[in-house]
Each structure stands twice: as structure tokens, then as C-alpha cells.
Image: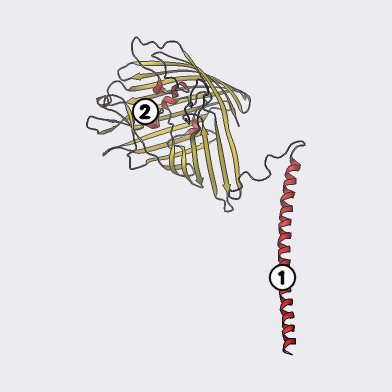
Amino acid sequence: MAQLEAQVQALLNAQQQQASQITQTQGQIAQTQGQISQTQTQLDEVRTRVAKVPAGKQPIQAQSIMAGAMPNTTFTFGGFIKMDGMYTDTSDGRIVDGSAGRLFYVPAAIPVAGAGADGGDGYTDFHAQFSRFNFSMDTVTDNGDKIKAYLEADMFGGGSNTFAGNETSTNTYALSLRHAYVSWNHWLAGQTWSNFMNAEVLPDAVDFLGPTDGVIFVRQAQLRYTNGGFSVALENPQTTMGAYRTGVRSNSGDSSLPDLTAKWQTKGDWGLFSVAALLRQFKYQDETDNGAALSVAGKFNLGKADDLRYQVNGGKGIGRYMALGLGPDTVVDADNDLHAQDGYGGWVAWRHLFSPKVRTNLYYAQALLDNDVEYTGYGVTERAQSWHANVIYSPYPKLDLGAELSWGQRQLEDDRSGDFKRIHTSVKYSF
């Protein structure tokens, strides 16, 4: 009887074990069927996308290019290819070969030598360094939050090897960072245009910048908050200094406080208007000074074919923010004390459309530096001004063929001045 009971119990245990294995196998079969169904759905989606491709063509990529991104993320790629060709003539000597002034209009680069100076023959430059590209990743969450990442670079200002920038054979140029930021709803963190600047009103120039003498132009790292037309930002501080009575420039990163900027902007069918403020601390070793400046900018539509654009700036310590640093923020005296310098500038531009394919722009710019000659001496820039006129022809919506005539002048505190004349042409294809 005992042996019989043991055999019955063994049979029951074997039956239970078989039942458990059957249940487990059924679960695995169901899971496999689910995976097969999911794979079939993906294949159907791919077939649908392929079916939409014209005959003889295949899709570039079957799956998302942002496979690791958050859901509901879109990716865009853009930029332009630009070739610049220019002929330059300067009255008081040549602009240094390979410098920024040979690539676009830089007022501080205009040579000034004085009476008897001879600029010699004009000189020609070709380059494609301002070609650029950008990546943008935009996400809208299920809650409606907006997240953006943006990265942009060009080939101006960089160098990566012995032959970088060598026009003898390779004309090799490395990438240069322009923008790199992330934004989340009202907040932005990273490098982009200064909040003190208004890029929307810049004129339609063939030159890289255009009215450089009086323009606010800075890109730098910052933390910005925007709500409607109002924005405020903490931005990277940097102090540019002029040496005592020599005009020699240097930089200081000793500031303990970031630059503070605030801007209010409004726009409509009539155009655009903004006013921006800047507060700064200057510091060199243990010496400090403060600065403040204002900038007013706008665009006024004069009808369907014309608009007027402008910008007026001024303040104490506006130095590196205006005219690509035509004047320093501060000057160091004989005792190493800092003295923030006053500066003023502005520009005005008229734009006219002859047709959807042909447009012209005429603009004037000026900067005035109120130097304290007791500290700066008389060999520093007092003012700069320029006139520009261009015609741009667009045979196709994204292709621009441009030609621009420019005249500029830089004057020193001792009344010496140098003139600048340039014929600037360009071919630009945006994508």
C-alpha cells in the first residue's frame, strides 16, 4: 500500500509539473505572437511610406532620425552656402591680409596713417567662410510644454591645423560656433544673440553685417527669461580696456557680476519696435567701475514695397557691444584705475522692392566715441561712418545674387582719418 501511494503521488507531481510547463509555454507563445503583431505593424508602416515614394526612388531613412529623442520631436536642418568676392581700396595703407577686415566691413580695420600716406593699388579677395549650417530639435510635450535645442556653425574664425586659413593651396577653415542653446517655454540657456541686440531689424546687406559702425552685435552665453514682448537676461561679462595714452587693447575676465540686459519689443502689420537696456560691472584686478546703456531699434513698413529700419544706441561702457568693439569699454589710467568710456551710434536703412525678384537697400551708419583724452591720448578712434548701397537679384526664391558699393571713414582724436571704398559681390543659396 505504501508503495502504491508513493507511485500515485509521483504521478500527481509529474502531472502538475507538466501543467505548469504547458501554462508557461502558452505565455511564451502569446508573447511571441504579440511581438510578431508589432513587427507586422511596423512593416505595414514602412510599406505605406515606401508606397508614397515615387517610382524608382527609395526613402532616405525608414525610421526617425532622432531615435533617441523625446516623443513628438521634430528635426530640421538648414543654412546657406555663400561666396563673397570683393575689391577694396583704402587711402592710408592696406588692411592686413587674412584679417577680418578683408572678409567684411570692419570700421576698426580701416588704416589711418596721416598726411602723405599712400594706400597703393586696390586688392581683391574671394572667400566662402560665411557659409553655415544649423540643426534644430523641437519638442511639444503632451502637456503643451515647448522644448528646443539649436546648434549653428560657420567656417569664419576657426583653425584646426597647420594649413588652416592658408590661401596658398587649401583654404582650409575649421568650424566656428555661432549658436548653441536649449529653451524650455519661457527660459533659454546657452549661446545666442545678446538680449541687448535686435537681429530682426538688421538691413538686407550683401556684406556680412552691413551698418557695422552703429550696430549692436554680440553673441554670448546667457540665461534668459522671456514673457510676451519682455525679456531679461544674465550674460557673460567681459571687460575690454585701453592702456593709458597708448590705445593698446586688452581684456579682463575679472568681473564678479554678469552683464544684465532687459528688452521690450512689440510688432504688428505696421512693423517692429524695441527698447533695450544694459547694466555692466567692469573689473581689473581690484579696481572696478560701472556702465549703463540704451538701444532703440525698429522697422516701419512704408507700404508693400518699402520699409525703413533704424537703431540708435548710447551709454557709458557700451564699448564691446557696439561696432564690433570699435572703442574699449574702459581706459586704465596711470594708477591702474578704470574709467568707463561713453559711446554713441546708430544707423538707418531704406529697403525697396522693385519686383519679387529684385530689391535694393541704401543705408548709413555712424559711431561717435566720447574719449577722455587725458587717459586715452589722441591716437585713438573718435568716430567712424559709412554709406552702403546694394542691389540683390533672386532668380529663384532661395538664390540671391548681390552687388554692394561701400564707402567708409575712420577718424582719430588728432583729426587724422582714413577712407575705405569697396565693391562687394556675393552668391548665396539658402536651404
Q: Nearer the viewer, residue 422 or 12?
A: 12
Quadrant of the image occupied by residue 59: top right
On the rendered image, what quadrant is the C terminus found in? top right
Q: Amino acid at mark 2?
A: Tyr
Tell me which residue sits at (24%, 33%) in the image. 336
Q: What residue does disc 2 label?
A: 344
**Which is more N-terminal, label 2 or label 1?**
1
Image location of residue 179, percent across then percent down: 49, 37
On the rendered image, what quadrant is the N terminus found in? bottom right
Q: Amino acid at mark 1?
A: Gln
Q: What residue does disc 1 label?
A: 21
In the figure, is residue 377 to the left or right of 50? Answer: left
Image location of residue 347, percent across then percent down: 44, 25
Report helix, strand or loop for mark 1.
helix
In reply to whether residue 326 is colored magenta, the answer given is yes
Image location of residue 120, percent across then percent down: 42, 10
The relative height of residue 309 versus residue 44 in the rendered view (above or below) is above
Q: Nearer the viewer, residue 346 or 87?
A: 87
Region of the chain picked out in magenta, as a range: 324-333
In the figure, is residue 177 to the left or right of 289? Answer: right
Quadrant of the image occupied by residue 412: top left
- Mark 2: give few (<14), some (14-19) or many (20+) Cα within 10 Å: many
